[in-house]
Amino acid sequence: MPPPATKIWPAAAAMKRLAVLAGSILLLLLSLSLFLFRPTYPPILSSLQALEPDRRLRVYVADLPRALNYGLLDRYWSLPAADSRIPASSDPDHPAPHNHPPYPESPLIKQYSAEYWLLASLHTAATAAVRVVADWREADVVFVPFFATLSAEMELGWGTKGAFRKKDGNEDYRRQQEVVDRVTAHPAWRRSGGRDHIVVLTDPVAMWHVRTEIAPAILLVVDFGGWFKLDSKITSRNSSHTIHHTQVSLLKDVIVPYTHLLPTLLLSENKDRPTLLYFKGAKHRHRGGLVREKLWDLLGNEPDIVMEEGFPNATGRDQSIKGMRASEFCLHPAGDTPTSCRLFDAIASLCIPVIVSDEVELPFEGMIDYTEFSVFVSVSNAMKPKWLTNYLRNISKQQKDEFRRNLACVQPTFEYDTSYSSSRGPDGAVNYIWKKIHQKLPMIQEAIIREKRKPDGTSIPLRCHCT
């Protein structure tokens, strides 16, 4: 006969369940304490902290003589003669005004002024995107404070005519080589092979003679046009569209805006725009700019389209202000390079850009959407008679008004000089550039680590250099 079943009274059952629950809670607290109070170890790579979204970019400024940046400005303002490339009456900087601006007003140079504003941002508390560090070992990136554009333009405008491509007697080349020698000799360059160094090359001919040496760095460029020209000389005719990954790549380099030359028009100041499409510039260009000549022939006789040829001097500037502010759309075809300052003048003028440039690269893509305020047209469609004009005429007033409102919203994004309006500060071009560089860090850091583990004698395919 089986023994009688043990009878569990309700109170005892409740106590047993409570004991089980208490044991479960004790185990949970023990596990949590082990997680929270476990010993900490140094991270595998301290640079991985760059992935923290709330951390500022840590920048070390390379130690270069003042003669290679602000000293160049002093020298520029002291030049006794005007730029030899333009009429003396068209040079606004020579003789130098008594209260001259911080960077040249000459349109040939001002459009590339990013180098000045980026360095200035590191000497002030004007940007919340970066933190300057005194020790290069603590830096995410190393900024090379060389005014490469100003150096090149001074050689082109005041050097020996036709000597820019040569090295003998070329002051710009001497400065380029000094920068390379100083920067590459520093342990910061040897640590990364230069991949975490920032070089500002807004002028397509800046650092022309030493581009192979600086190619691994993070290059800040307005487009890849100057590099395309260099590459086309060393590639076969059947591969002329190839851009060598050892030189430029969207994976590591940053497209930055030109500095606009025309004053900013606020949306509240906008008036009627009787002209459908406006363009002012040189008709005859090279390479991809040949499309400009064809567009000129196709559009030149349209009644509500203005195609003007001219130089951005004082007279041309006034004409451009008037033309862009009176037009619904502003044409932006490729020139010697895929893009130009004209695009940012159009944005400043609230004139809807019409971009006809198949190889164009634009600043801050991924952060802003250009299709919300610009019209993109393929070269093949633009070359069809009447196609472009019919397309633009069919854009509704509602759509054009929306484009213009969006233009007004993005205007601050392309503003370098934030001093004229405090509201432009955190949204200006300088901060956007620093943020874009910050986005590149994980890929750049991965490339540095991959490079470190490769043994001597390893042959690295070109495709790996793009990172």
Image: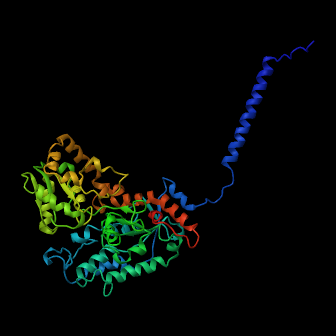
Q: Residue furthest top?
A: 1
Residue 320: x and y in percent read 14, 61
**Vertical side of 424 occupied by 192: above or below:** below
What residue lies at 52% left-to-right and 65% top-to-bottom?
448
What residue lies at 26% left-to-right and 61% top-to-bottom?
339
Total residue callouts: 0
Q: Quadrant of residue 428?
A: bottom left
Residue 334: x and y in percent read 23, 61
Q: Residue furthest front?
A: 238
| Left or right: 186, with 22 as reference point | left
110 or 191: which is nearer to us?
191
What residue lies at 37% left-to-right and 57% top-to-bottom?
432
Q: Residue furthest bottom?
A: 169
154 or 382: which is nearer to us?
382
**Vertical side of 192 occupied by 96: above or below:** below
Q: Is residue 168 visible?
A: yes
Q: Quadrant of residue 79?
A: bottom left
Residue 105: x and y in percent read 23, 70
Q: Quadrant of residue 154?
A: bottom left
Q: Is residue 105 visible?
A: no
**Vertical side of 150 occupied by 324: above or below:** above
Q: Residue furthest right?
A: 1
> Quarter of the image containing the N terminus?
top right
| Left or right: 17, with 388 as reference point | right
53 or 421: which is nearer to us?
53
